Amino acid sequence: MRTSKTFSIQFWMDTKKSIKGEGLIYARVNVDQKRSSISLKRKLDIEQWDEKNQKHHGNSQKAKDFNRYLDLSRAKLFTCYQELRDNGSPVTSKAIKNLFLNEGSFGHTLKELIGYHSKKIENTHAVGSIRNFKVTEGYVERFLKNKRLNDIALSVLNYEFLCDFENFLNAYYPKSHPKAMSHNTVTKHIQRLRKIVTLAYNLEWIKDDPFRRWKSSFDKVDREFLSDSELSKLATHHFELDRLDRVRDLFVFSSYTGISYVDIRNLTKKNVWIGDDEGHKWITTFRQKTNTKIKIPLLFRAEQILLKYEAHPVTQFTGKLLPSITNEKANLYLKEIAKEVGIEKNLTFHMARHTFATTVALSNGMPIETVSKILGHSKITTTQIYARVMDHKIKSDMDAVQERLNEKARKIEEEKELIHLQEKIIAAEKKNYSHMTKEELLKKLNNVLNE
């Protein structure tokens, strides 16, 4: 652990803000040439302050009591300095000041806050959210060890701490990962740490939010999905291995319903009901991630998959609608499936939801509000992440624009032709009446008006 090169304590009087000839006494703590001033909440007559020796002039009882208070304050500040070192916390002038003002108590720590937060969310957050917070907490633990710290006081957290944590995550290679974390993954971990520290602020464990200046930003990522031809090829392919056949069916079912993997695993016959719309089957359930209720009418291919496993030994034993397998194995088998079918994409189960949103729903005219409702999103902006405009949709929309342009052009040509005919008729009529006298023209006009 790096220790401070310099540490000193000085006392001084603020004469600039003196009132009635009295100035406030401060302690100045210096650590590595960085200082913090601490008000001792003691006033003294300016003439009685010995600036050179940093104490009360004279040997009166009042002077002795005042100087004893200064000695106690010096000892207390030094104790704070030692306590920070012994606890393995960063030793800074600000940390010593915060510890001193907390009546010598080390105060709440980051690990204590993490423990409190974990208990707070265990009955209010989804399993997936709790798991994500656990992962972030693990990285915070590794970061502290990297700084050779057992724990850290909340009072010494600052923007620099968050920047150091971000740098640590950017350089960290998780086990079994081929590369370091992406920018978006790092940002999510920092967001979770910020939520935890914000809780400390709301609990009044800290006076200020140390991370208030940090702004999150995400890189735009194009989510992959299967095209119409790829989905059709996958759905109709014959697999020799049962395990690949089952995982393919789960993926296709998700692609035609938008239901996530974890929610598919929980489906039973109780989740299927017959609607009032001419007896069509619907699935209703609650998303495990957000506890949002979703209601989905089954498309033909999804209904056929349910019929396929209606009397299957696995579903008969488990009571579920479809066979169950771990998400890790499903994604592993999807790599085999993609290779066998000839799909040159990194096939993952979550891609099925993107395929439903883009290829099955939006590309076939379903409004994004309806897609958002089916996917169980609480905000439509979340659905927009899934939405992609496919090439054939662009071509279709451009054809519609061209048709409207052609229609406008036809109308313009018709108007020009009409004007031209009117001009020809007027010219012809002028010839018919050019030889007539004024009296004859008036007579002709009178006959036309009387007709």
Image: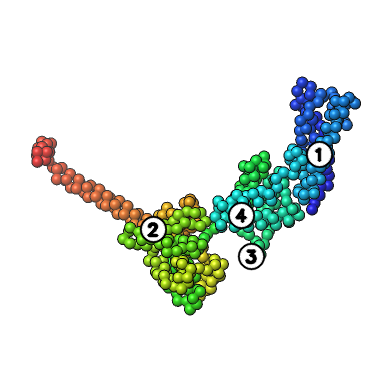
Looking at numbered disc 1 in the image, what kind of residue is underneath it?
A: Lys
Of mark 1 and mark 2, the one earlier in the sequence is 1
Q: Nearer the viewer, mark 1 or mark 2?
A: 1
Marks 4 and 2, Cα distance to the nearest angstrom?
38 Å
Residue 368 seen: no
Q: Nearer the viewer, mark 2 or mark 3?
A: 3
Of mark 4 and mark 2, the one earlier in the sequence is 4
The secondary structure type at the circle numbered 4 is helix
Which numbered dot is residue 365? 2
Q: How is the image coloured?
A: rainbow
Give the position of the C terminus as an image quadrant: top left
Which numbered dot is residue 133? 4
The residue that label 3 is drawn on is: 177
The residue that label 1 is drawn on is: 76
Nearest the eye: 448 or 18? 18
Marks 3 and 4, Cα distance to the nearest angstrom?
19 Å
In the rendered view, does 239 fall on the left or right side of 429? right
Marks 2 and 3, Cα distance to the nearest angstrom?
39 Å
In the rendered view, does 14 fall on the left or right side of 289? right
Q: Nearer the viewer, mark 4 or mark 2?
A: 4
Look at the numbered discs 2 and 3 and tell me whether their residues touch, using CB distance below 8 Å: no
Residue lying at 81% horizontally and 23% vertically, measured from the top left: 45
- Which residue in the rendered view is the most extreme toward the right? 59
